[in-house]
Image (cartoon, rainbow, N blue to C red):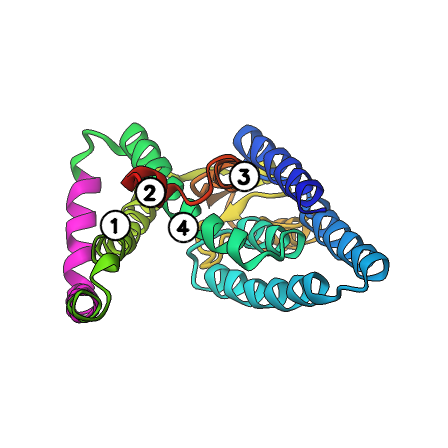
């Protein structure tokens, strides 16, 4: 049954990812369908084998990651679509071991993806470099706290379980790298992904530059904006087209397991 669930999760994430790359949006029906199929197959599994544990984890972990995804969306880290796909994947794949490997792989793939994407978009632009450095300086207390906490954790792990020293060190390094590239990506978004368009050219899925969350406009909202907006032009923005990363992380997890262990040769 897990193999079927992996196929469902991969096809759903891949479809959403391809649509996201093509038009920067995908239908809400995709994550909703994934969630419905996930709950359905684990409900059938529970009735067939009298094992309700996968169904319980599907509902519990799915709800947990829905909250995490929604919080990420509210703070502007992800778009609403990315948050929905993350929750949908967990609803479909309620294996704690698989999800743990998937999250680590998602972090690794995200960093690689953001590096390539960021370099391709912002390479050579002085305003991006300066803005990123200023952003890091403004958040220096966060970085100092992270470094202190990580150092204490690494030293403690070395004293208690020396075997985890290298793995934990790399994982914490990945964490701070992820934070840096999220900040870098947000600077690119602010500086390069904003443009003014005629208000009559607004379409469903466009994101207003003034919006804190990465959420596309609905047709009803567009009608209201056109009705009450006094200017002929309006500023919109595009986010990093990130959704394809979920499909890549699922495939890597299915075929290779924990990519961190593979890279370390464990």
Magenta span: helix, strand or loop, mainly? helix
Residue at 32% across / 45% down in the picture? 185
- Name the one closer to the observer, 163 or 2: 163
Query: In the image, is residue 46 part of the stretch drawn in magenta?
Result: no
Q: CA distance from mark 1 to mark 3?
A: 25 Å
Look at the numbered discs 1 and 4 and tell me whether their residues touch, using CB distance below 8 Å: no
Q: Which residues are magenta?
A: 127-154
Residue in the image at 31% along x and 28% along y: 120
Q: Is residue 110 left or right of residue 158?
A: right
Task: Judge the density around disc 4: few (<14), some (14-19), many (≥20) Cα neighbours within 10 Å.
Answer: many
Q: Which residue is mark 2?
A: 111
Write down the quadrant of residue 124 in the picture.
top left
CB of mark 2 within 8 Å of CB of mark 1? yes
Q: CA distance from mark 2 to mark 1?
A: 7 Å
Callout 4: SS: helix
Which mark is in front, 4 or 2? 4
Residue 88 place in picture, x, y as percent: 63, 53
Report helix, strand or loop for mark 3.
Answer: helix
Query: Whole-Å distance between the Cαs marked 4 and 2?
Result: 11 Å
- Tell how many labels: 4
Foreground tag (2 vs 3): 3
Residue occupied by mark 3: 254
Mark 2 or mark 3: whose residue is earlier in sequence: 2
Disc assigned to residue 104? 4
Q: Give coordinates of residue 183: x percent, y percent.
A: 29, 52
């Amino acid at each position: 049954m897990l193999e079927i669930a992996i196929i469902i999760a991969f096809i759903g994430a891949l479809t959403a990812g391809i649509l996201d790359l093509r038009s920067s949006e995908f239908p809400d029906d995709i994550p909703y369908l994934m969630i419905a199929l996930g709950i359905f197959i684990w409900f059938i599994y529970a009735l067939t084998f009298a094992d309700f544990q996968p169904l319980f984890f599907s509902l519990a972990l799915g709800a947990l990651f829905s909250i995490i995804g929604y919080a990420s969306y509210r703070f502007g880290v992800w778009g609403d679509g990315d948050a929905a796909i993350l929750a949908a994947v967990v609803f479909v794949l309620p294996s704690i071991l698989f999800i743990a490997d998937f999250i680590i792989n998602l972090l690794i793939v995200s960093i690689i993806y953001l590096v390539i994407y960021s370099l391709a978009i912002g390479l050579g632009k002085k305003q991006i470099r300066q803005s990123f450095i200023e952003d890091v300086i403004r958040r220096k207390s966060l970085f100092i706290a992270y470094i202190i906490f990580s150092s204490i954790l690494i030293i403690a792990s070395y004293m208690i379980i020396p075997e985890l020293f290298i793995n934990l060190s790399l994982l914490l390094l990945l964490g701070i790298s992820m934070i840096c590239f999220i900040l870098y990506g947000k600077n690119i978004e602010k500086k390069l992904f904003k443009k003014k368009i005629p208000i009559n050219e607004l379409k469903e899925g466009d994101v207003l530059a003034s919006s804190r969350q990465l959420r596309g406009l609905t047709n009803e909202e567009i009608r209201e904006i056109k009705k009450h907006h006094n200017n002929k032009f309006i500023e919109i923005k595009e986010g990093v087209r990130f959704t394809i990363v979920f499909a890549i992380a699922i495939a890597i997890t299915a075929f290779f397991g924990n990519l961190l262990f593979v890279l370390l040769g464990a």
